[in-house]
Image (spheres, rainbow, N blue to C red):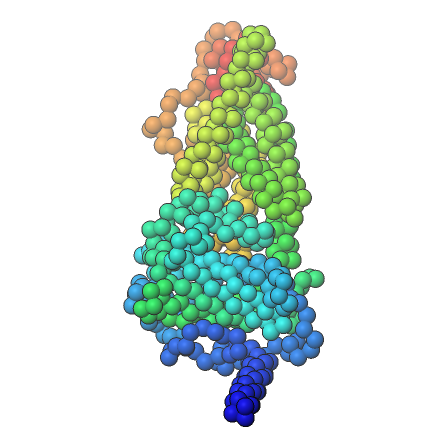
Amino acid sequence: MVATQRLQFSLWKRRRGLGFLFQIAVGWWVVLLLVNPVAGLRPLRERTRSWDDEQLFTRKDESNLGPFSQWNITGTYKGNWKFLDTTNGSSRFPNIRKTNGNSVIELVTTPTKISGVHYVQGVVIFHDVFDNEYDVSGAQIRIEGVYIWPFRQLRMVANSGKEGELNQNEDYILSNPYHLLGVFSSQVLQDSSRDKMWRRKHSLIHDAEKHCNIEIAAQISRLPSSNNEGEHDHFHLEGLMESPSADDDGDCFSPLLLNATSVKIEVYYNKAVNYTLVVTFVSFLQVLLLIRQMEHSSTQSGAAKVSILMIGQQAIMDAYLCLLHLTAGILVESLFNAFATAAFFKFVVFSIFEMRYLLAIWKASRPLSNGEGWETMRRELSVLYSRFYGILLGGILLMYEFHNYLRPLLLLMYSFWIPQIITNVIRDSRKPLHPHYILGITVTRLAIPLYIFGCPNNFMRIEPDKTWCVCLAVFIGLQAAILLLQHYLGSRWFIPRQILPEKYSYYRRFDQETRHATDCVICMTAIDISQRSNDCMVTPCDHFFHFGCLQRWMDIKMECPTCRRPLPPA
């Protein structure tokens, strides 16, 4: 009996001692969390080359000293990545020779039943991973984990080597305007999702996703209030990413340091709204320029000098811009009003003014068919509209099929002055376009592509290409310069005279012994018909007019005022 009591007492003392040791361990763990949260929360495997946690987070967030508040860290983070070592120590993927680059992190947090813990899912996109010899825009890794907001700790993992895990072939899209418009511009103006998927399957990153685990330990800190813009808080993310092999045979990559700051959506909104305001203003200027040009070529002869291909090509460009802005507005609901306004003004430009001018040019170029009846007119109008909308839809299919050559296609679309240059040379037209229209349309057409492909901080997240922007500006500027020189020097100023066709001379010699009418039927005054006179012009039908009278008449109609026969260009 006594031995049994002694045994029970001994067991009780042992349990009490273990309980005391457990309390001490828990107490030290809590103290460690409060003093250095990363060291306490980092349950990554022990590694001989692991970076010390004291070196990882030397900055202490002063807001943690006060009462804890729940932070919503959902959003987009832009920053950079770099290897802690001078070179990548991985023997599995030696082709990754770059030591740093840009990164984008997308996070979405969801509260859980556990107090102080949020479930987090997202994606990390690493840019500039390989050298230029590899056609890979970046490495995209989907991650998930927890965010313990009382200690501002973010712990995330990714394991794409096991089947049934996250599908790496699907693009991760968040309900974030920054990310959505970036995906939209990437698929429409740069790469389609099909090509992105093909490149990822045939890249070395695809092998890395199969054989590597991803473990991320990060610290979240709030930016100082002086850096905040708007009502929302902005955060800074700093963490360490380690990539142990899924086969436990070493490391895939050397440890990476992630350093990113949340994107200020208010600033992003302002950029997008300012862009739509610029597009609206540019559309309004184009309407004014079109009205000026329509007044300049208001007569039948003036409208017939304008190339219908030039106006039709500009109308198709405005139709594409209308569709693009409308699609962007539907994609991002919070920016719908701004993009819908820009799309509406582009719709007005192409559907009202440019189509009206297109019909005026078509009617002026066919003066003899106006009296053929309504059925003939309706049939030819149907052919005109079917060609226009057929080219419009065919262009969409062409750009979708050859989207990898989008920049050359844009150069082709911005050659809209070339049909007018060729028309001027063939018809020897005199001043078909107003100089203000040439200069204004050239400048306003350059505004949108130069912003999208030239601005380094454009809201569509497209990498700038200064060389292409310079080529575009020089290309369209050269076309405008040729048109202006044709306006002031003549439509055939750059064509050698040896290859020009024979041109009718209105100052030709005539038989003075033959009796001719000596009065101009336009101004009803006498004409000096002496051979030395430069004020007398003779038509092919042997009718005499003053130089100024016949020039003003031919600006209205290319017909003889006396007998209504067609007149050759002067």
- Answer left or right for 542 relative to 161: right
Percent x, y of residue 481: 48, 41
**563 versus 45 height, above or below:** above
| Residue name at image x 50 percent, y 16 percent | 567
Along the line of sight, which residue is nearer the eye, 180 or 70? 70
| Residue name at image x 57 percent, y 40 percent | 327
Displayed quadrant of residue 214: bottom left
- Answer left or right for 254 relative to 357: left
Along the line of sight, which residue is nearer the eye, 429 or 165? 165
Percent x, y of residue 130: 36, 60
Percent x, y of residue 397: 45, 33
- Answer left or right for 437 relative to 162: right
| Residue name at image x 45 percent, y 30 percent | 394
Q: Residue furthest front?
A: 1
Marks counted in the figure total 0
**483 versus 61 height, above or below:** above
**328 versus 373 height, above or below:** below
Along the line of sight, which residue is nearer the eye, 487 or 121? 121
Where's the N terminus, which quadrant? bottom right
Q: Is residue 78 visible?
A: no
Percent x, y of residue 284: 65, 39
**507 versus 349 height, above or below:** above
Q: Is residue 187 visible?
A: yes
| Residue name at image x 48 percent, y 60 percent | 143
